[in-house]
Image: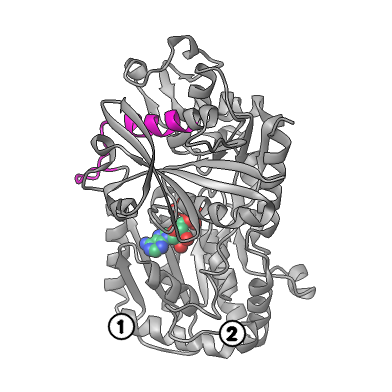
């Protein structure tokens, strides 16, 4: 029997994306059909995606909610069924989806995402235009109030809540309970109260029927003070309802054999053709080509989480030995400056582009020899999965999904030919430096390097296994 599922999310690729959350929501929207799950995605109609409203059908006029008129529109785009929340007073504005033009959180983010959860609960309970989901799947703090509002209004479809990154929790002053329409009876330890404030994610975690996160290791880490960021107690208490299911990537979008952004497509059997992409990347960044020198890359948000300050410390030694390095990313001003300075110190060997550029990300994944993901914590990480698919070896810290997806090129793994990259622990500049040295040593033996590349390209990075697990979770929750 088909399971009807409603995803409730603040991002969905390819329409609006700031990180991996969008990729996952978009991928689930596209792949679950193969597992007998009919998905719809409830998404705010931000100004950035206003064009999606053209030709969309109005399914619900919800009247005035959270300070203005609200409608829900339905459309289908890129193979995904979307329910768009048209609430101009909350979403039709300049800036970014979470931040205003000054780079600060929108002051009314609690209302902007409160509405998202409110409508998720409403549709989960009463359906929309005759379509009622069997299960609601809320993502991250922005959708965290979904099960809270559901409980408040007397229930509805069971709710799965996925934590993509516990660092973002949606904590707001208790005075906002009124504007959010939250019943003060829920302002308890067992509800959405969080150290005297309203916790969107905390409330969701208490009341969701099932919690998932994006890798088995991160699921375990979340229950520890080091990684739980204050919610470790809540998660440990709900351990029996917490599952770690690895993210996948969209293997059609990320296909080195058919990627239009590449200078030259290739497969594991035609690895030699990858070199044309390396040349294209070096040329893009104006760097000197040297076939003996590995090209390292970073494609990332520039934030403390990603450990790129460690890369700044570790890279100079590798660059002195001839390595090339390119970075595509944006975020912290300090890190942007640090990488620009690195490029000034090594003008022929380091290229830096500040910004978000999907096509360039694809070309770099194809052209680099190895990619660095030295994260301090990493719920799953998608960059290393994309890299593996492109035969670009990941160099990663041993945490979260990075621990679960990369097989370190240690002696044992090399002996049985199963290695797919390089891991290092603890997450320090010195250990990252050692890993860069190891990678350079293996790179010098091109035969061994190619074996690793082929292993990486064979490693399953798609959604097959995880989508089946998610479908099984939905089915286990659906009342018969
Ligand atoms: P997070 O969600 O923490 O940012 P993930 O690795 O889970 O990290 O997902 C980030 C995704 O966004 C990856 O697919 C990555 O390649 C991509 N990405 C990150 N920064 C950029 C950028 N500046 N330009 C293009 N793609 C980027």
Does the rendering let one see residue 310? no
Q: Is residue 220 magenta?
A: no
Q: Is mark 1 within 8 Å of ligand 1?
A: no
Mark 2: few, some, or many residues within 10 Å (few <14, many ≥20)?
few
What kind of element bears circle 2?
A: helix
Say which quadrant the C terminus sits in.
top right
Q: Quadrant of ligand 1?
A: bottom left
Secondary element at tag 1: loop
Which residue extends farthest front? 130
Q: Position of residue 138 (x, y in %)?
A: 52, 37
Image point (45%, 72%), residue name: 362
User: Which badge, 2 or 1, is on the more N-terminal residue?
Assistant: 1
- Residue 22 to residue 148: above or below: below
Q: Which residues are magenta?
A: 99-120
Residue 247 image position (x, y, % from top left): 60, 53
Residue under numbered circle 2 = 444
Q: Could you tell me which residue is drawn at 64 percent across and 48 percent down?
A: 37
Is residue 115 inside the magenta stretch? yes
Place residue 323 in its image quadrant.
Answer: bottom left
Q: Which residue is mark 1?
A: 286
Q: Residue at x 53, y 59 (%)?
A: 382
């Amino acid at each position: 029997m088909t399971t009807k599922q409603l995803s409730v999310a603040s991002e969905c690729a390819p329409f609006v994306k700031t990180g991996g959350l969008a990729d996952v929501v978009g991928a689930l929207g596209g792949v679950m059909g193969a597992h007998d799950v009919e998905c719809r995605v409830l998404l705010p109609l931000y100004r950035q995606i206003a064009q999606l409203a053209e030709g969309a059908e109005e399914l619900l006029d919800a009247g005035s909610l959270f300070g203005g008129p609200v409608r829900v529109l339905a459309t289908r785009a890129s193979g995904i069924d979307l329910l768009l929340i048209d609430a101009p007073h909350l979403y039709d504005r300049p800036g970014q989806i979470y931040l205003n033009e000054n780079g600060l959180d929108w002051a009314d983010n609690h209302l902007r995402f409160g509405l998202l959860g409110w409508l998720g609960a409403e549709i989960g309970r009463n359906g929309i235009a005759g379509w009622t989901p069997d299960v609601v799947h809320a993502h991250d703090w922005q959708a965290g109030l979904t099960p809270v509002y559901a409980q408040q209004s007397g229930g509805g479809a069971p709710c799965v809540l996925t934590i993509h990154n516990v660092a973002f929790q949606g904590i707001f002053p208790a005075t906002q309970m009124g504007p959010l329409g939250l019943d003060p009876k829920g302002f308890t330890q067992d509800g959405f109260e969080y150290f005297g404030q309203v916790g969107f994610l905390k409330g969701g975690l208490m009341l969701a029927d099932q919690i998932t996160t994006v890798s088995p290791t991160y699921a375990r880490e979340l229950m520890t003070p080091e990684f739980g960021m204050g919610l470790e107690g809540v998660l440990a208490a709900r351990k029996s309802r917490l599952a770690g299911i690895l993210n996948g990537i969209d293997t059609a979008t990320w296909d080195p054999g058919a990627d239009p952004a590449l200078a030259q497509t290739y497969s594991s059997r035609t690895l030699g053709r990858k070199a044309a992409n390396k040349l294209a990347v070096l040329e893009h960044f104006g760097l000197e080509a040297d076939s003996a020198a590995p090209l390292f890359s970073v494609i990332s948000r520039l934030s403390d989480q990603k450990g790129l300050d460690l890369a700044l410390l570790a890279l100079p030694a590798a660059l002195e030995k001839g390595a090339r390095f390119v970075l595509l990313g944006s975020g912290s001003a300090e890190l942007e400056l640090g990488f620009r300075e690195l490029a000034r110190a090594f003008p022929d060997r380091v290229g830096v582009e500040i910004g978000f550029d999907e096509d360039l990300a694809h070309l770099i994944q194809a052209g680099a020899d190895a990619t660095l993901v030295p994260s301090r914590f990493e719920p799953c990480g998608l960059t290393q999965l994309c890299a593996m698919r492109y035969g670009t070896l990941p160099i990663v810290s041993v945490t979260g999904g990075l621990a679960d997806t990369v097989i370190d090129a240690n002696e044992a793994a090399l002996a049985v030919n199963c290695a797919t990259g390089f891991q290092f622990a603890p997450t320090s500049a010195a250990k990252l430096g050692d890993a860069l040295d190891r990678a350079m040593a293996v790179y010098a033996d091109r035969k061994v390097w190619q074996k690793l590349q082929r292993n990486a390209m064979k490693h399953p990075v798609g959604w097959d296994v995880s989508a089946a697990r998610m479908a099984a979770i939905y089915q286990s929750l659906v009342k018969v």
